[in-house]
Image: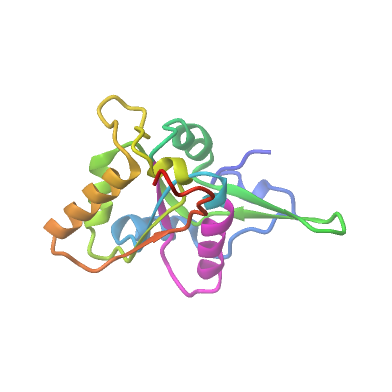
């Protein structure tokens, strides 16, 4: 099985495919992004990207999500890029039946690239920046492994918001979707 745009129609017939034009969605998103998410882990791929997939499938939106990975710079080139940003959501029901859905709502993936993050954040079409980086990502430890970008998530968000302010100070929703078990070090 190959999960990519070229082979998407060769997947098993039990896989639920998106019912929107993926290439058109990608083009629209890159030109006028509405949602930027920081943190490309499993929670994002299953939940946030799944929600956007449903919105796209039902015609409520026509853009996807641009995801930025601040911690593990290998996630985008190893888990996203080879699969054209497609991912699988597998739900195992109590009766043992599994539903498999191809998630295609991720329009682009950025990895430890502050200029690109700030460029997306400055786009006046952007409506929301959300985060799922776990509580450790909010600490003072460096989260981005690249030597030229050894900063925390809060510094990343601050830089992106400052660039947005410089570009016209358009309103934005900033939403942390993390569940903090321990908050004394945050």
Q: Which residues are magenta?
A: 46-69
Q: Residue furthest top?
A: 147
- Quadrant, the N terminus: top right
Residue that appears at 46% across and 30% down? 74
How was this image coloured? rainbow
Residue that appears at 45% across and 37% down? 76
Residue 142, x across and y down, in percent: 34, 32
Q: Residue furthest right?
A: 95
Q: Would residue 41 appear left or right of 63 to someone viewing this image?
A: right
Nearer the observer, 67 or 80: 67
Nearer the observer, 100 or 181: 181
Nearer the observer, 106 or 17: 106
Please say if 58 is above or below 174: below
Please say if 155 is above or below 58: above
Residue 106, x across and y down, in percent: 47, 52
Q: Residue furthest front?
A: 184
Q: How many numbered marks, from 0 up? A: 0
Residue that appears at 41% across and 41% down? 137
Give the quarter of the image for residue 145. top left
Give the quarter of the image for residue 127. bottom left
Residue 63: say if magenta: yes
Residue 4, x across and y down, in percent: 56, 43
Residue 2: say if magenta: no
Residue 28, x across and y down, in percent: 36, 61
């Amino acid at each position: 099985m190959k999960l990519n745009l070229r082979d998407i129609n060769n997947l098993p017939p039990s896989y639920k495919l998106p019912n929107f034009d993926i290439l058109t969605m990608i083009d629209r998103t890159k030109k006028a992004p509405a949602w930027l998410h920081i943190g490309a882990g499993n929670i994002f791929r299953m939940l946030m990207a799944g929600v956007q997939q449903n919105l796209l499938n039902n015609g409520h939106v026509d853009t996807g999500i641009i995801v930025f990975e601040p911690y593990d710079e290998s996630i985008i080139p190893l888990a996203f890029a080879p699969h054209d940003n497609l991912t699988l959501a597998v739900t195992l029901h109590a009766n043992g039946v599994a539903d498999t859905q191809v998630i295609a709502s991720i329009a682009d993936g950025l990895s430890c690239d502050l200029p690109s993050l700030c460029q997306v954040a400055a786009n006046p079409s952007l409506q929301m920046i959300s985060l799922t980086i776990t509580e450790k990502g909010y600490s003072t430890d460096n989260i981005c492994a690249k030597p030229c970008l050894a900063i925390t998530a809060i510094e990343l968000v601050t830089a992106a918001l400052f660039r947005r302010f410089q570009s016209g100070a358009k309103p934005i929703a900033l939403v942390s979707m993390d569940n903090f078990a321990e908050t004394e070090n945050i």
